[in-house]
Image (cartoon, helix red, strand yellow):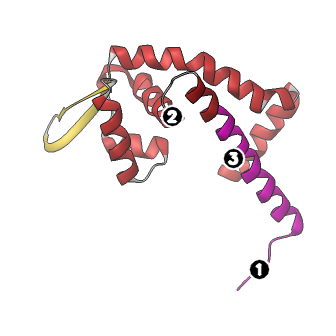
Amino acid sequence: MHTEPAQSTIRAWIRLVRAHHRALSGIETALKQNGFPPLSWYDALLELDRVGDSGLRPFELEEKLLLPQYGLSRLLARIETAGYLTRRPAAGDGRGQVIAITESGRALRARMWPVYATALQTTIGDHLEDEEALTLAALLERVAG
């Protein structure tokens, strides 16, 4: 059974995609202009920092970041080469590994945040009142499930 979406649904989809693209582009540009790596580095370092020294298995990080496995592998390799994360064998799993943030990774994430925060405010916050931002967040939560 094929059901056409309502025009309002199509309009919401188009606006959501455009807003997403605009916000990401603004944030990525700000990070690059300030000499920082891409936003995906920040996101990975944030998730690793949240769990502390215990680290995460790659599949756990993959779920948090919503990246395909091949994309995550390349991302982690670049971040590791730069010295911002470490890998160690997973206890009880001879082939598994745990990924953890390094002190320099924590420092990089902390330096990136003010640039990220300013870009987030510029691309989203400056266009919405607080109540509107809360309403948008609630609506997107319903869509995200």
User: Which span is picked out in magenta?
Assistant: 1-27
Task: Estimate the spatial distance between the alpha carbons at disc 3 and disc 2, rounded to whole Å.
Answer: 15 Å
Quarter of the image holding residue 95? top left
Give the secondary structure at mark 2.
Answer: loop
Q: Position of residue 98 (x, y in %)?
A: 25, 34
Residue 76, placed above or below residue 9: above
Residue 144 to residue 130: above or below = below
Q: Quadrant of residue 132?
A: top right
- Residue 93 visible to an observer of this rendering: yes
Task: Give the structural element (helix, strand or loop) at label 3.
Answer: helix
Q: What residue is at 51 percent from the left and 34 percent from the top? A: 38
Q: Position of residue 18 (x, y in %)?
A: 75, 50
What residue does disc 2 label? Answer: 38
Amino acid carrying label 3: it is His
Instruction: Tell me which numbered mark, 3 or 2, is placed earlier along the sequence.
Output: 3
Foreground tag (1 vs 2):
2
Q: CA distance from mark 3 to mark 1?
A: 27 Å
In depth, the one of 24 and 12 nearer the eye is 24
Report helix, strand or loop for mark 1: loop
Observer-nearest of 99 and 41: 41
The amino acid pointed to by label 2 is Pro
Is residue 101 or residue 24 the one in the foreground? 24
Q: Main secondary structure of the magenta part?
A: helix
Q: Which residue is mark 3?
A: 21
What's the residue type where badge 1 is placed? Answer: Thr
Q: Quick one: quadrant of the N terminus?
A: bottom right
C-alpha span from label 1 to label 2: 39 Å
Asked if 8 appears above or below 27 in the picture, the reply is below
Residue drawn at the location 66% of the way across and 21% of the way down: 117
Q: Are marks 1 and 2 in contact (CB under 8 Å)?
A: no
Q: Which residue is mark 1?
A: 3
